Amino acid sequence: MYVIVVGGGLTGFNIAKLLVEEGIGVVVIEKDLTRCQEISKKIDALVIQGNGSNPKILLEAGAKDADLLIAVTNSSEVNLISCITAKNLGIRKTVAKIAIEYTFTEDIELSKVGVDYAFSPGTIIAFDVERILELPSALAIQAMADGKVTMAEFKVAEGSKYVGRALKEKIFPDETIIGAVLKDNGDTIIPTGEYIFEEGDKAFILGKPKVVEKVVERCSECQRVRKVMIIGASNTAVQLAKMLERSMSVKLIDSDPERCEEISKILQKTLVIKGDIMDLSLLKDEGIGDVDAFVSLTKYDQLNLFSCLLGKYLGASKTIARVENIELIKFFEDMGVDVAISPKVSTAEHVMRFIRMGGLKSLIRLPTGQAEIIELTPSKNAKILGKTLRDITLPDEILFLIIVRENKLIIPKGDDIIQEEDKVIISAKIDKIKKIKELFGQY
């Protein structure tokens, strides 16, 4: 496979890096010379300086031989033109990052003009936040295997019944399994039965949706989210409010009077308030101490951090902050923000799920970047078929989590055999993904 990435910002860089790690040939097109030099030093990819919408630059990048073009510059127009031009030059598939306002229009079929798949980071973030608020005890939640499996992340709190206990003690229901554990020091553990939980661990649990939800709810005193306060009137915030107002009481605060008037016409039930986040009296009057979730979605990291800390100080139960600088995610959480969510990280994972070839589908790259939880279907000639898991030689740090066979969920044991139509969910360190692909016949 051969991929051209247009745009060498953090989003494009993250996507290119993930592709390179899987042994896929990558060319990055970036206008800024300094940024080109930085990318060349960090990943093994050909980097070309230029405009990705220029046919000459695309031809130089090998567009006639490429399987896929991913356009993720900060300009929706450049991304769309890059895809259209690339399609005319013979590229099979194209992906474009577009501004969230494009997603409000359902009458335009971009596939007819050469864009096979379009996405908006703002829309992705809105959906991610909505899922988190639906299960407030979870730090993150993801559906897998066509909705038959749920994965949720939860924190092992002080005084938790799990602290000091090993996985082999069967402390979780039979229909669930722990796929990975994130430590305070940044390490990612693919746990065996001997693993003993410590306070502060962030665990990823997988299993039947309702069972997982019950486990996560018992890990926290969080109640169902009914009242939400959103800071910032960005398009992402407006889309989130529109999604939440159907079942929750939502207040949205922004300092721009014209913007407030504009979005009040879009939102039907959300109370739009013109005000300053620094106005403590306003926040108290609007009941910040009674909200179940406080969400800050401005484009400024400093403001989002301060807003969430202020919200926590004034009594908000749960805080969620948008983070542009991915290096600050852990800092936000260490400072007391419950969930720090990055458009760039979420976008890279979202695009990778779309472009995976064959039977391999990435579900989530864990926040430390050291491991993934992936879903695979074996090819007809896969090495793994017809053998018990016990008879398959596997390196350490690979864990078979769940086999989905028709409507049945199987927590695999040594005697289980993978069948051709199975959906198999596995957690593994990044450097072991290649070995898994070989076993499943996904080269």
Image (tube, helix red, strand yellow):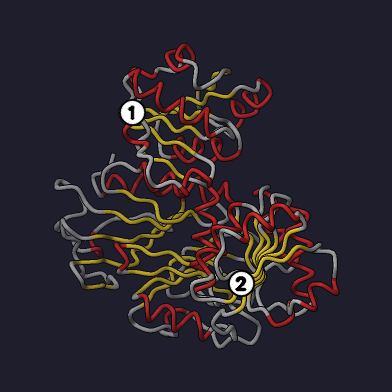
Q: Nearer the viewer, residue 316 or 196?
A: 316
Is residue 168 depicted above or below 10 in this figure? below
Q: Which mark is residue 349?
A: none
> Does residue 290 appear left or right of residue 394 in this picture?
right
Callout 1: 10 Å neighbours few (<14), some, many (20+)? some
Rendering coords of residue 351 (x, y %):
44, 44
Rendering coords of residue 300 (x, y %):
73, 50
At label 2, the amino acid type is Val
At label 1, the amino acid type is Asp
Is residue 330 depicted above or below 212 in this figure? above
Please, what secondary structure does the residue beneath circle 1 have? loop
* N-term-proximal mark, 1 vs 2: 1
Rendering coords of residue 9 (x, y %):
60, 34
Please, what secondary structure does the residue beneath circle 2 have? strand
Q: Which residue occupies 54% across, 82% down? A: 224
Rendering coords of residue 421 (x, y %):
17, 58
Q: Give the residue at mark 1.
A: 67
Is residue 120 depicted above or below 177 in this figure? above
* Screen quadrant of the N terminus: top left
Q: Give the residue at mark 2.
A: 250
> Does residue 417 appear left or right of residue 194 in this picture?
left
* Screen quadrant of the C terminus: top left
Q: Which residue occupies 69% across, 53% down? A: 259
